[in-house]
Image (cartoon, grey):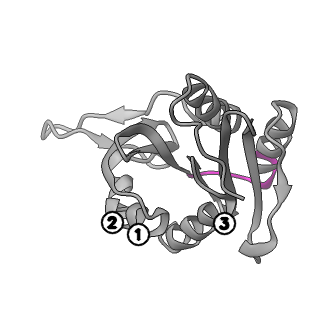
Amino acid sequence: MTRTGFASTPRLKWAIAAVVAGITSVALSAPVMATPPSGRTTQRAGTVTQNWCKKVPLATITAVLGKKATKVTPQVGGTSVVCWYTVAKQDHAVFVRYSTNYTVAKYNADKKLSQSTGQHPKADSKFAPYQAFSSYVGSAAYGYTYSVTVLKKSNELQVGASNSTLAKMEALTKKILPVV
């Protein structure tokens, strides 16, 4: 069932922040940088860069959601990057979070935190053999933000959007998972 109307409410940013902060709080610290003698800035091993967002082009978001994605804004922190997509003139409408150096314990902690913050996590078997859960936050009056979190080896991928459906989040996650 599609929920709409959420994008125009002040609760949108709260809902997205709740999903992202609740599930990524363990990995969004400042990136570790090193400056080699050449003057170019590089990332140390185990960190990610904003270039990771190029692996999920605007065309992929547009094709799966059926709404035009016009901009991506990366937010890098240590071993994680969150790619925020503007869709239909709505900033932060879609997020794709990629984290490295993840363990089953961290994944389970994310799922537990999701439960404790009212995000209703539920195991999602559509991503077998990987562990995955879907979650949502919101209400019928304001709409819902859905997300899917997948642990693939030592990497965690989380994909979410407001004004969408769980089925579309699962489809988008399946499109992105091969590049993880």
Q: Is residue 101 left or right of residue 127?
A: left
Above or below residue 76? Residue 96 is below
Residue 17 at what x, y percent from top left?
60, 29
Residue 60 at what x, y percent from top left?
39, 67
In the rendered image, which residue does mark 2 sit on? 59
Residue 124 falls within the magenta-colored stretch:
no
Neighbour class for label 3 at 10 Å: few (<14), some, many (≥20)? Answer: few
Residue 63, label in figure:
1
127 and 48: which is toward the camera: 127
The span shown in magenta is 99-106
Kind of residue sitting beneath label 2 = Ala
8 and 176: which is toward the camera: 8
Kind of residue sitting beneath label 3 = Ala
Residue 101 falls within the magenta-colored stretch:
yes
Q: Residue at coordinates 40% horizontally, 38% vertically from top-left? A: 90
- Rounded to the nearest angstrom, the CA distance separating label 3 from label 2 is 18 Å
Residue 180 at what x, y percent from top left?
52, 66
Considering only order in the chain, which callout, 2 or 3, is on the residue closer to the N terminus?
2
Kind of residue sitting beneath label 1 = Ala
**Quadrant housing the N terminus:** bottom right
Q: Residue most toward the left? A: 38
- Rounded to the nearest angstrom, the CA distance separating label 3 from label 1 is 14 Å
In the rendered image, which residue does mark 3 sit on? 167
Q: Residue at coordinates 14% horizontally, 36% vertically from top-left? A: 39
- Rounded to the nearest angstrom, the CA distance separating label 1 from label 2 is 6 Å
Q: Residue at coordinates 57% horizontally, 47% vertically from top-left? A: 163
